[in-house]
């Protein structure tokens, strides 16, 4: 092994002191590549995640519900934009990242390949999907890469609102008719296991975790975060009056945590491989939006060129 360079020593010292690496700082190529992949995948998830909820925008049951849902979906667009900007500070090209999403070279969260079948899904996505996202993202506020950590602080504030709006919608439905309560329970039954899969494969099958933790990009393992999410969700489900669809779910006094069943990892692999219910549809909608927006990008580029010419 060769002795570390001054740059490497500085990078190591910044991490050891729990300080932030900034875009102008030297960083190992693998750290840069790993961050670009993670931030891009995160950005893609925010943007693709707009689709399942937008499915209910024109059919929201009241003006109030429509306004809330619209604001939430617009927040997700904003999250995508912060994150693409953070990836650009690492030298990534946003157009290229979008191409990689559309061509399937880069992934987005598997959760968004499940369909939204009734309006209770909007509430359950807020409660469980945004709730799981919060568990994943709060530790990222302390990520060692400055622009990513700072973007996450703002994103997490908005995610808390998303979680609350979902929970409030479900609470309202649970106080309604039997048919509404049934809709909520049925939606919980469909989303619970996919929400647990959002934390990724079990630690034993997650080869990059160790390195990401060493780089202080990740602070907790997949299984730790999944446990935290289960422990957080159980009392919320009780308050709501719904049953989580896991017969193995029970309090373990010794561990001070809940025991719970094993998600269907074969299903997760299938969805990641592109065989989920909505994978093809999500990418097709994104491709059409990208192609439909070509004239806007061309006009913006022409405007920027013109401004350059006019400058003395
Ligand atoms: Fe978001
Ligand atoms: Fe959200």
Image: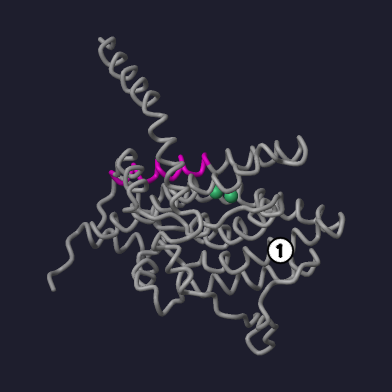
Nearer-the-camera pick, 221 or 6: 221
Classify mark 1: helix, strand or loop.
helix
How is the structure coloured here? one colour
Horizontal side, residue 137 vs residue 83: left or right: right
Nearer-the-camera pick, 66 or 115: 115
Q: Which region shows up in magenta?
A: 77-91
Across and down, in percent, residue 205 comes to 39, 76
Q: Quadrant of residue 38?
A: bottom left
Nearer-the-camera pick, 229 or 57: 57
Across and down, in percent, residue 235 comes to 74, 70
Q: Quadrant of residue 35?
A: bottom left
Depicted 63 relative to depicted 252: above or below: above
* Quadrant position of the N terminus in the picture: bottom left
Secondary structure mainly formed by the magenta segment: helix
At x 46%, y 76%, the residue is 202
At x 60%, y 55%, the residue is 130
Give neighbour class at mark 1: few <14, some 14-19, many 20+ (Cα, 10 Å).
some
At x 76%, y 35%, the residue is 63
Depicted 179 relative to depicted 302: above or below: below
Horizontal side, residue 79 vs residue 1: left or right: right
* Quadrant position of the C terminus in the picture: top left
At x 75%, y 58%, the residue is 183
The residue labelled by disc 1 is: 186
Across and down, in percent, residue 249 comes to 67, 80
């Amino acid at each position: 092994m060769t002795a570390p360079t001054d740059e490497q020593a500085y990078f190591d010292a910044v991490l050891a002191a729990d300080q932030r690496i900034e875009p102008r700082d030297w960083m190992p190529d693998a750290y840069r590549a790993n961050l670009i992949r993670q931030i891009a995948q995160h950005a893609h998830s925010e943007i693709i995640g707009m689709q399942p909820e937008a499915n209910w925008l024109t059919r929201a049951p009241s003006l109030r519900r429509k306004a809330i849902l619209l604001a939430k979906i617009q927040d997700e667009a904003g999250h995508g934009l912060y994150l693409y900007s953070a990836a650009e500070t690492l030298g990534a090209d946003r157009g290229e990242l979008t191409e990689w999403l559309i061509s399937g070279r880069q992934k987005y969260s598997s959760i968004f390949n499940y369909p939204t079948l009734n309006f209770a899904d909007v509430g359950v996505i807020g409660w469980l999907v945004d709730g799981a996202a919060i568990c994943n993202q709060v530790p990222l506020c302390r990520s060692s890469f400055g622009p990513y950590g700072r973007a996450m602080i703002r994103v997490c504030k908005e995610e808390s609102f998303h979680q609350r709006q979902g929970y409030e919608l479900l609470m309202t439905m649970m106080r309604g008719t039997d048919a509404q309560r049934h809709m909520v329970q049925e939606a919980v039954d469909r989303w619970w296991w996919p929400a647990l899969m959002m934390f990724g494969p079990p630690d034993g099958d997650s080869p990059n975790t160790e390195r990401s933790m060493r780089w202080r990009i990740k602070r907790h393992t997949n299984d730790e975060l999944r446990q935290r999410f289960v422990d957080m969700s159980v009392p919320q489900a009780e308050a709501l009056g719904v049953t989580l669809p896991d017969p193995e779910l029970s309090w373990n006094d010794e561990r001070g945590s809940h025991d719970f069943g094993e998600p269907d990892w074969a299903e997760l692999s299938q969805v990641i491989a592109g065989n989920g219910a909505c994978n093809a549809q999500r990418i097709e909608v994104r491709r059409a939006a990208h192609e439909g927006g070509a004239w806007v990008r061309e006009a913006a580029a022409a405007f920027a060129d013109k401004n350059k010419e006019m400058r003395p």
